[in-house]
Amino acid sequence: MQWTYRLARSGDLPQIVEIYNQAVNTLESTCDTEHVTETLREAWFENHLASTRRPLWVAESAVLGFSGLAGYLSFSHFMNERPGYFITSDMALYLHRDAQCKGLGTFLLSNAIKAAPDLGIETLVTTIFSSNTASVQLFKKQGFEQWGYMPRVARLCGKQRDLIMVGRRVVSD
């Protein structure tokens, strides 16, 4: 499959929200339990568009079988934007349901690892529900290690969820 990615542009927000809301439906990738709106995501989106160090990438494919965005990856500040943590980026990776299990996650994540040092990022981290085995495996295959385990920190539709933090250094010390 041929994938490309680019920086998000102003017109991408509706499709990003659509992809995110697909994840909300699964109860496997986010603690949001109801769909978000474009209005709710505007500030987050505008912050990414304005940032040179914490971009938002969108992925596309001319051969996927549907038009529009196939997924997105965002780099975000870690631990409430405290300056000492600026070498670390939290990441979010969401794929359109029709783009899952087709190599897009690997494509975006491997490119994020390569791009991170040029963004001033030395360490990448994310959190994943332990029940989301596909995401856990994706990150492990890209060299991420489990750095933390938080049992029963979320409840979605009455079911408790454990959270795993994974991380990877992308520069050598």
Image (spheres, rainbow, N blue to C red):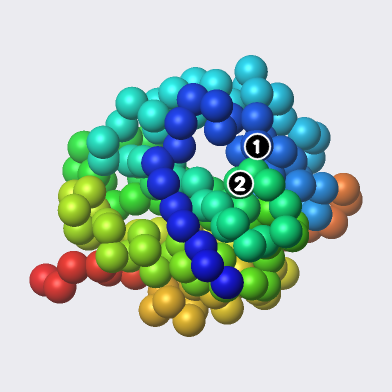
Between residues 87 and 49, which one lies in front from this camera angle? 49
Q: From what the image shows, is residue 142 above or below residue 152?
A: below
Query: Label 1, label 2: how many angstroms apart (C-alpha)?
Result: 6 Å
Residue 134 drawn at (x, y percent): 66, 73
Q: From what the image shows, is residue 55 above or below residue 135?
A: above
Q: In this view, does 171 lie to the left or right of 95?
A: left
Between residues 106 and 122, which one lies in front from this camera angle? 106
Is mark 1 in CB contact (under 8 Å) with mark 2? Answer: yes
Q: In this view, does 167 lie to the left or right of 99?
A: left
Amino acid type, callout 1 = Gln
SS for dot 1 = helix
Q: Look at the image and tell me whether residue 154 can be seen.
A: no
Q: Quadrant of residue 104?
A: bottom right
Quadrant (top left, top right, bottom left, bottom right) of the C terminus: bottom left
* Residue depicted at x 58% and y 30%: 13
Q: Look at the image and tell me whether residue 9 can be seen.
A: yes
Residue 77 drawn at (x, y percent): 35, 41
Amino acid type, callout 2 = Leu
Disc 1 residue crowd, few under 14, some 14–19, many 20+, Cα 10 Å: some
Q: Which mark is residue 103?
A: none
Residue 132 drawn at (x, y percent): 69, 68
Q: From what the image shows, is residue 23 above or below residue 172?
A: above
Q: In which quarter of the image is residue 26?
A: bottom right
Q: Which mark is residue 69?
A: 2
Q: From what the image shows, is residue 117 above or below residue 75?
A: below
Q: Is residue 164 left or right of residue 26?
A: left
* Residue depicted at x 49% and y 25%: 10
Residue holding disc 1: 15
